Image (cartoon, grey):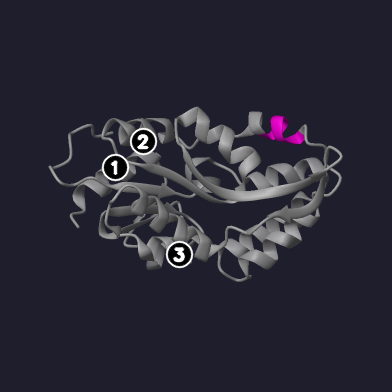
Amino acid sequence: MTTTPPPAGARRVVVMDVDSTLITGEVIEMLAAHAGSLELVTDVTERAMRGELDFTASLHERVATLAGLPVSVFDTVGQEITLTDGAGQFVDELHRRGWPVGLVSGGFTELVRPLARRLGIGFVRANSLQVRDGVLTGAVEGPVIDPHAKAEALKELAGMHGVPLDHAVAIGDGANDLLMLREAGLGVAFNAKPVVAEQADVAVAGGRLDAVLEVIDRHHP
């Protein structure tokens, strides 16, 4: 991992997806494993990430299978989450450089926020699962974080810190990240589905997340 200070005036804002980017798995599949719906959810997730299904409709379909799970499942799944190799070092270096960092996820705040706190990240946009009487209802609460919402979140974080979009970096792996990657000055496909790798500015396959630093440092807006 490079720790060479970036050139003066090269301040960036970095927004990244969570599932299969910052972490190694898909949290909805981890939840589904506890609900007995893993096979169905995995199939729908794969098709959605390849761009074969509408993301919002597929999310509702998958979340419906979680109805009846106790809220204690969040603690259980939280312990199962594994950071991608180099993720902690990557975020630490971004913080060292003074670059704002955000997590924008089609996953769930109940799992993403604790992860963000652990990494010292304050900006989080993710879906919320509806809970009644201590159990999941199988519905999403509030607006869905869809591809358009991800792109808007990138603009929001950049605007909050006065960083132009051509200095923004977006990192993701699935079709629901494509709008976000297009809006950013540098869109990075990390371990991405082919449809994403083909359309991103740069594709990084395999290895460590902090390998993206070299890509960022080579790219001059």
Circle on res. 90: 2
Looking at the rendering, the stretch of residues picked out in magenta corresponds to 73-77
Q: Is residue 127 left or right of residue 91?
A: right
The amino acid type of the residue labelled 3 equals Leu
Helix, strand or loop for disc 2: helix
For the view shown, which residue lies furthest in the left direction?
A: 8
Q: How many discs mark residues in the rendered view? A: 3
**What's the CA distance linking mark 2 and mark 3?**
22 Å
Residue at 58% in and 40% down: 112
- Prevailing SS of the magenta stretch: helix
Residue 172 image offset from top left, x and y in percent? 45, 54
**What's the CA distance linking mark 3 and mark 1?**
20 Å
Name the residue beneath numbered marker 1. 213
Residue 29 in the magenta stretch? The answer is no
Residue 191 image offset from top left, x and y in percent? 45, 51
**What's the CA distance linking mark 1 and mark 2?**
7 Å
Q: Residues within 10 Å of mark 3 (few under 14, many from 20)?
A: many
Q: Are marks 1 and 2 in contact (CB under 8 Å)?
A: yes
The amino acid type of the residue labelled 2 equals Phe
Between 220 and 103, the one lying in front of the other is 103
Q: Residues within 10 Å of mark 1 (few under 14, many from 20)?
A: some
Name the residue beneath numbered marker 3. 178
